[in-house]
Image (spheres, helix red, strand yellow):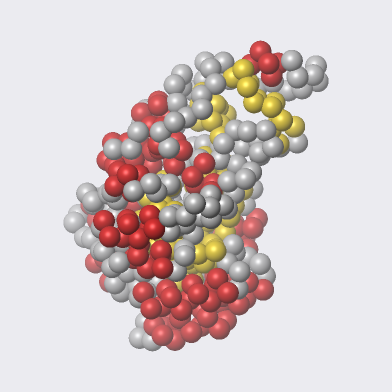
């Protein structure tokens, strides 16, 4: 993760959205025809388009009023216990028509792209009913300007209609919502929020095993607010990713590392997906232990967790800045974490995440002279996104 392949004075030739050649400018220039369009990146830095492997950018309205409550001392958990939090966004998202939700969500996607993101995973989970979960995932399919990889997160919170009957809601997911999502081919992954007051390890086992049987990959929200052994659970379920991990201990890190303990490089283990923007925005001080994870050989992924509650930032540059300043990752590690590693965590390593011939021409030109400045300046340095 700490070794970048940097080409000084480089050039890239691409056609029909696919890279044909990468190398020193002088060599690539020999392949350029007169009619080709030229993007002049002189003085800048060129990287692969960033890959955001964990977002909730499909939502209606916002939670600025809860932000103000947290500024006055209320905690995320207290707000949720009083009926706000995720359920606040559920009410707004349910109330929006599909076209209203698309319009708001397209704006959020435009923000992601403006900050250098060309691929974003996005989760449902502000519907929590058959109709509204499908509405969110249909909106995901219509987003333009970035490539969207959809995840079904019906198990984001207990649906308000099932407040006193959480088992009934899990049953609805298993028997109605998940099968409908699969029948319409609306998601590639299934996710669940494992935390006190949300879903239990046992729920995750039942739901995610079923999702895997139906051909979906598995991502999980674990160990965000407390250590519940979520990383170990994710490893035991052969999840594709274990996300958050703020409270994961060394035993959890070792369980994740075990999933990679094979000589066969074609086999992927469970990727740790770290979301420092949510730690920051909740005003918490405990960041995931990225250094211990990297020391254990884990391919760390960085993502924004962009959502209206715990992480109102669409900027992977900001996530990289926090990774460097708060988690002591190097600028090179931070860049790899939200390009190559993020792409592999979404089963897209073969066609994006690095600049190589044959891969998608997802490219960012940054108005900085050195890649380290992408995480260093606290500003948007994306100059042109292709
Ligand atoms: O990843 N932890 C659960 N889900 C989101 C928060 C969603 C919300 O507050 O709306 C997260 O932090
Ligand atoms: Fe999240």
Q: Residue at x 54, y 46 (%)?
A: 343
Report the residue that reaches farthest toward the top.
26
Q: Residue at x 63, y 72 (%)?
A: 182
Tally of numbered tags: 0
Q: Position of residue 141 (x, y in %)?
A: 64, 58
Q: Can residue 268 be seen at all in this image of the molecule?
A: yes
Q: In the picture, which quadrant includes the N terminus? A: top left
Nearest the eye: 231 or 279: 231
Report the residue that reaches farthest toward the left.
73
Report the residue that reaches farthest toward the front.
263
Q: Position of residue 113 (x, y in %)?
A: 54, 40
For residue 13, above or below residue 276 = above
Q: Residue at x 34, y 48 (%)?
A: 296
Tell me where residue 24 sits by quadrant: top right
Q: Can residue 106 be seen at all in this image of the molecule?
A: no
Nearest the eye: 89 or 360: 360
Tell me where residue 261 sits by quadrant: bottom left
Q: Position of residue 220 (x, y in %)?
A: 43, 63
For residue 368, above or below residue 292 = above
Q: Residue at x 46, y 38 (%)?
A: 336
Query: In the image, is 62 to the left or to the right of 361?
Result: left
Q: In the picture, which quadrant includes the C terminus? A: top right
Tell me where residue 271 sits by quadrant: bottom left
Nearest the eye: 129 or 199: 199
Query: In the image, is 105 to the left or to the right of 325?
Result: right
For residue 184, above or below residue 362 = below
Query: In the image, is 198 to the left or to the right of 184?
Result: left
Q: Position of residue 32 (x, y in %)?
A: 75, 19
């Amino acid at each position: 993760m700490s070794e970048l392949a940097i080409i000084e004075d480089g050039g890239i030739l691409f056609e029909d959205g696919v890279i044909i050649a990468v190398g020193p400018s002088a060599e690539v220039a020999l392949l350029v025809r007169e009619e080709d369009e030229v993007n002049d990146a002189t003085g800048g830095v060129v990287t692969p388009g960033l890959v955001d492997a964990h977002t909730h950018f499909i939502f209606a309205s916002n939670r600025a009023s809860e932000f103000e409550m947290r500024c006055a001392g209320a905690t995320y958990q207290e707000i949720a216990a009083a009926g706000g939090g995720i359920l606040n966004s559920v009410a707004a998202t349910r109330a929006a028509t599909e076209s209203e939700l698309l319009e708001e969500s397209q704006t959020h996607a435009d923000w992601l792209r403006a900050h250098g993101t060309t691929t974003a995973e996005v989760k449902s989970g502000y519907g929590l009913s058959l109709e509204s979960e499908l509405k969110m995932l249909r909106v995901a399919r219509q987003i333009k300007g970035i490539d969207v990889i959809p995840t079904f997160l019906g198990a984001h919170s207990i649906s308000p209609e099932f407040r006193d009957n959480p088992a009934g809601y899990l049953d609805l997911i298993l028997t109605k919502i998940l099968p409908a999502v699969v029948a319409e081919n609306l998601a590639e992954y299934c996710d669940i929020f494992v935390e006190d007051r949300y879903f239990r390890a046992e729920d995750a086992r039942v739901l995610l095993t079923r999702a895997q049987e139906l051909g979906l990959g598995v991502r999980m929200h674990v160990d965000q607010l407390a250590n519940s052994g979520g990383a170990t659970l994710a490893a035991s379920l052969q999840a594709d990713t274990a996300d958050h991990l703020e409270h994961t201990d060394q035993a959890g890190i070792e369980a994740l590392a075990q999933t990679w303990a094979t000589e066969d490089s074609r086999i992927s283990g469970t990727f740790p997906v770290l979301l420092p923007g949510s730690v920051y925005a909740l005003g918490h001080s405990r960041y995931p232990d990225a250094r211990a994870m990297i020391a254990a050989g884990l391919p760390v992924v960085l993502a924004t967790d962009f959502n209206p509650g715990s992480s109102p930032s669409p900027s992977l540059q900001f996530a990289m800045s926090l990774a460097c300043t708060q988690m002591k990752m190097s600028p090179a590690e931070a860049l790899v974490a939200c390009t190559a590693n993020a792409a592999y965590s979404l089963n897209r390593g073969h066609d994006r995440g690095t600049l190589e011939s044959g891969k998608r021409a997802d490219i960012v030109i940054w108005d900085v002279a050195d890649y380290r400045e992408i995480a260093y300046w606290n500003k948007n340095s994306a100059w042109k996104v292709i």
